[in-house]
Image (cartoon, rainbow, N blue to C red):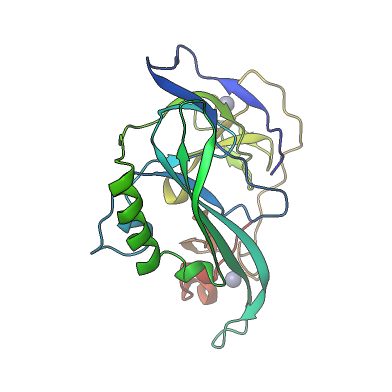
Amino acid sequence: MSQHPARRKVPGAVVPDGWVRLTVPPVPDGMRPTSWRRTLDAVHPGKAGVDALPGHWLNPGDDIALPDGTLLLAADKTGTGTAVNARTRRRYTTEDAHLTIALLAPDATLTPLWARRYTHAASALGREVTNKAVALLAAHPAPGEAPVILAEAQRPNRRAAACRWACGTDIAPGDGHLIGSGRNAEVEHWPDCTAPANLPVPRPRATCDNCEGHGRGHEATDSNGIPGRVCARCAREPSYLLSFA
Ligand SMILES: [Zn+2]
Ligand SMILES: [Zn+2]
């Protein structure tokens, strides 16, 4: 992801009185697009993974407003290699995760309070992190407010898709803007539907999104939350072993 993504202002959005304007830290060059940021608002120890740490998702590069005193939880992931699934003999990318918790100061600086690198991203959000979150939230009670988005950074789509607005025309990979995530992700023109296409739209593919093999008769979601269509063999794989990028 670029350090200087294209941005578009959100019409009418203003910084609420007493709130702080900041840019959500971009994902550093070379880090995986699966890296993420969110506010840390509470802890639900009975839940697993990110559900144990309720908060609001933040898009890297967006200009936003939040109350000072908000804690931000970030995961920056690096590809560490590849592994081969024993059953299918298919390769997938393994990731580590560098977790940080930072405090938003009134002058909009982010003060790191805690950081830790986990060798396996899949197991990063465990008891150690939830215990740390409990202690930090006791010292810095969360305002718990949803961010106001002032300007959006472009999140380029990685696959061709039809625009979600009335224009409905196809958008080439990298030319549009992703809205939402995972199964509910949609693509729209950037910065709007009147912008001329920068990239040619490829012809629809006929092969599996995961293995490039024959057949795409099954819906699936990959490890990055990207929806796609896969062959019968890949349809039997757990989503964390699929990659459609
Ligand atoms: Zn459009
Ligand atoms: Zn396949």
Above or below, 138 against 86 in this view is above
173 left or right of 240?
A: right
Q: Nearer the viewer, residue 116 or 173?
A: 116
Above or below, 64 against 209 in this view is above
Above or below, 94 against 65 in this view is below
Q: Report x, y in % for residue 84.
A: 62, 82
- Residue occupying the point 32% across, 65% down: 48
- Residue occupying the point 37% across, 59% down: 132
Q: Report x, y in % for residue 240.
A: 50, 68
Kindly indicate the quadrant of the structure image that contains residue 92. Answer: bottom right
Quarter of the image with the N terminus is: top right
Q: Report x, y in % for residue 81.
A: 69, 73
Ligand 1 falls in quadrant: top right
Residue found farthest to the bottom: 86
203 left or right of 129?
A: right
- Residue occupying the point 42% across, 64% down: 125
218 left or right of 30?
A: left
Residue found farthest to the front: 139
Total numbered circles:
0
Kindly indicate the quadrant of the structure image that contains residue 160. Answer: top right
